[in-house]
Image (cartoon, rainbow, N blue to C red):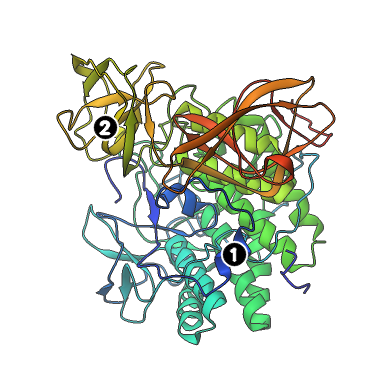
């Protein structure tokens, strides 16, 4: 194998992802320098969930967000250790649940033809690949059983279950800690979680699937309820990443064999009864399916789950010396699906994007994840359209997380708002105006803020102040009115992107000091035929801006504008 140096509070709605970041400690000396060789003097706000998600690991939880110190449970009992005993597993059995695919071990047909992107997968340097966060997380953390394996406690019945996605993510998290430290404790935890996934597998015509032992109603609305055992294509994708990386670290053939058998699931077509991890719709789009159902058109088509499964396929391609034809074909097919649907189906202009294409619930928590996954697609494809699309999603709705910072407030801020924002979860906040208050501010001032959001129906981005006489009131976030003093909504690019103009363009660029103060501005003329490098963009002084790197304007901040474009390599098929 070629060296890689080339490189989910289950609430009333969806089963949510939350970071399994744990109590992170600093990476070894020099790691941060290796991760970002350029610097910008503008101070960065504390790392947000979104920023970590680009390379970090998430985990599914239930009831409450399970971060921090470990909660230890007994090892869960298996519901169907013999898949042949599962309801509907015998092809001749009467069907009581015709919706949930079952572990029917019969010969399967290969996945049919599908449309493919013109882009090719690209190697990514070690340290920048999916799930490589650059953070060390002491173990154990979150909910684990007595053997140190990640488990899930359902809030609807109080029972503890195995959860293949959560276990794969736990393993990926600890593998990152092992990569950074070399401490075998982390490798041991990763192996334990991966082995649990293997031990619980169901085999269908040689392909491995990883079952769930609980009934699951995704949005708790009675639609598309999955009954046990059921399997998830996202579990296939993240288990695939886990097995690939364990093979890389240990060199053991068992992990390559596990990766081969897991990848095989993506090559099997649905047959009307059995498990499946992928399917092709009537438009020829390949879906890597997190929540599969029959008929196949009732499968959920979850955007984030589709893209995480792409990570696993990319890992498998990498393991095979960047030359595995089936992996490359599946990856290009999955990429084309996002190329076609990212803006037409999943984008929800001026609000949160959609979580899935079937039930079409809003992706309140996942909206930021979509942006970060687009940025990973840029790393994987070097197609800068994903930079642009991530930016469009960011401006549709900026980071809604509860966050802290300092807001600069100018005299142009003339109104404050009380909004319907008291609910804990963003999906339950209507953000509609309850009360307004006229303001007369004579000089630029400021106050701490504790939340960001957007008013509905195409309304402005807003900040909620948490100190002073306007505590609890919202003000418009805009570069002429009020803004975070620190850089927020950060998007990072690897490789660096290239900006250009079509004609000589005179515009202003700015420098900031380490406290976030705008200390210098000047007018410059950008020339056609010249590329201007950027390794990041962010919301700076209330507006999206490029952070320039290299050349005469290294370290300067350029507000985004229509005349400054991101260079694309030719060959874009969708348009």
Q: Quadrant of residue 345?
A: top right
Residue drawn at (50%, 86%) of the image: 184
Q: Nearer the viewer, mark 2 or mark 1?
A: 1
Q: Is residue 76 visible?
A: no
Would you say 243 lies left or right of 439 here? right
Residue drawn at (55%, 61%) of the image: 131
Please state the horizontal and vertical placement of residue 148, each as a whole percent of the image.
37, 78
In the rendered image, the quadrant that contains the C terminus is top right
Please state the horizontal and vertical placement of residue 440, each as a whole percent of the image.
23, 15
- The numbered mark, 2 or 1, whose residue comes first in the sequence reads 1
With respect to residue 421, does 127 lie above or below? below
Question: Secondary structure beneath disc 2?
Answer: strand
Residue 464 numbered tag: 2
Q: Quadrant of residue 127?
A: bottom right
In the rendered image, the quadrant that contains the N terminus is bottom right
Please give the residue where the numbered disc 1 appears in the rendered image. 33
Q: Nearer the viewer, residue 475 or 254?
A: 475
Q: Nearer the viewer, residue 122 or 539?
A: 539
Please state the horizontal and vertical placement of residue 375, each as a whole percent of the image.
61, 45
* CA separation in Å, label 2 and label 1: 34 Å
Please state the horizontal and vertical placement of residue 338, each as a whole percent of the image.
63, 37
Label 1 Cα neighbours within 10 Å, binned few <14 / some 14-19 / many ≥20: few
Q: Nearer the viewer, residue 520 or 407?
A: 520
């Amino acid at each position: 194998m070629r060296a890689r140096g080339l490189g989910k509070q289950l609430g009333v709605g969806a089963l949510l992802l939350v970071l399994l970041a744990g109590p992170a400690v600093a990476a070894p000396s020099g790691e941060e320098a290796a991760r970002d060789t350029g610097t910008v003097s503008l101070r960065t706000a504390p790392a947000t969930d979104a920023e970590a998600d680009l390379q970090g690991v998430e985990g599914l939880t239930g009831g409450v967000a399970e971060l921090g110190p470990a909660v230890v449970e007994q090892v869960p009992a298996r519901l169907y250790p013999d898949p042949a005993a599962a309801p509907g597993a015998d092809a001749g059995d009467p069907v009581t649940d015709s919706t949930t695919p079952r572990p029917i071990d019969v010969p399967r047909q290969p996945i049919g033809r599908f449309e493919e992107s013109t882009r090719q997968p690209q190697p990514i340097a070690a340290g920048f690949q999916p799930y490589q966060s650059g953070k060390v997380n002491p173990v154990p953390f979150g909910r684990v059983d007595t053997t140190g394996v990640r488990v899930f406690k359902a809030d609807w019945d109080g029972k503890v279950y195995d959860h293949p996605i959560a276990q794969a993510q736990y393993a990926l998290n600890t593998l990152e800690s092992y990569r950074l430290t070399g401490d075998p404790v982390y490798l041991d935890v990763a192996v334990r979680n991966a082995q649990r996934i293997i031990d619980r597998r169901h085999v269908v015509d040689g392909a491995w699937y990883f079952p769930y032992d609980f009934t699951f109603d995704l949005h708790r609305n009675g639609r598309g309820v999955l009954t046990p055992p059921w399997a998830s294509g996202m579990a296939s994708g993240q288990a695939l990443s886990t097995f690939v990386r364990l093979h890389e670290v240990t060199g053991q053939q068992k992990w390559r064999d596990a990766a081969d058998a897991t990848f095989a699931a993506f090559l099997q077509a649905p047959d009307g009864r059995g498990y499946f991890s992928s399917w092709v719709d009537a438009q020829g789009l390949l879906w890597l399916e997190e929540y599969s159902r029959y008929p196949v058109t009732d499968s959920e088509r979850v955007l984030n789950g589709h893209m995480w499964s792409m990570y696993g396929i990319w890992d498998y391609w990498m393991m095979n010396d960047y030359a595995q034809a089936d992996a490359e074909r599946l990856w290009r097919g999955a990429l084309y699906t996002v190329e076609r649907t990212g803006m037409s189906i999943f984008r929800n202009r001026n609000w949160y994007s959609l979580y899935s294409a079937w039930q079409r619930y809003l992706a309140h928590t996942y909206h930021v994840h979509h942006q970060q996954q687009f940025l990973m697609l840029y790393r994987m494809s070097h197609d800068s359209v994903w930079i642009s699309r991530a930016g469009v999603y960011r401006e549709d709705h900026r980071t809604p997380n509860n966050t802290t910072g300092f807001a600069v407030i100018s005299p142009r801020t003339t109104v404050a708002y009380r909004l319907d924002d008291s609910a804990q979860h963003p999906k339950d906040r209507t953000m509609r105006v309850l009360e307004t208050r006229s303001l007369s501010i004579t000089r630029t001032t400021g106050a701490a803020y504790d939340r960001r959001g957007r008013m509905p129906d195409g309304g402005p981005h807003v900040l909620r102040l948490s100190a002073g006489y306007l505590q609890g009131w919202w003000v418009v976030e805009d570069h002429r009115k009020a803004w975070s003093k620190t850089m927020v909504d950060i998007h990072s690019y690897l490789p660096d992107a290239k900006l250009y103009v079509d004609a000589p363009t005179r515009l202003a660029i700015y420098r900031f000091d380490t406290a976030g103060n705008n200390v210098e501005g000047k007018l410059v003329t950008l020339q056609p035929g010249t590329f201007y490098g950027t390794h990041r963009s962010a919301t700076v002084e209330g507006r999206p801006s490029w952070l320039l790197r290299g050349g005469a304007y290294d370290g300067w901040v350029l507000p985004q504008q229509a005349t400054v474009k991101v260079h694309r390599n030719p060959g874009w098929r969708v348009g």
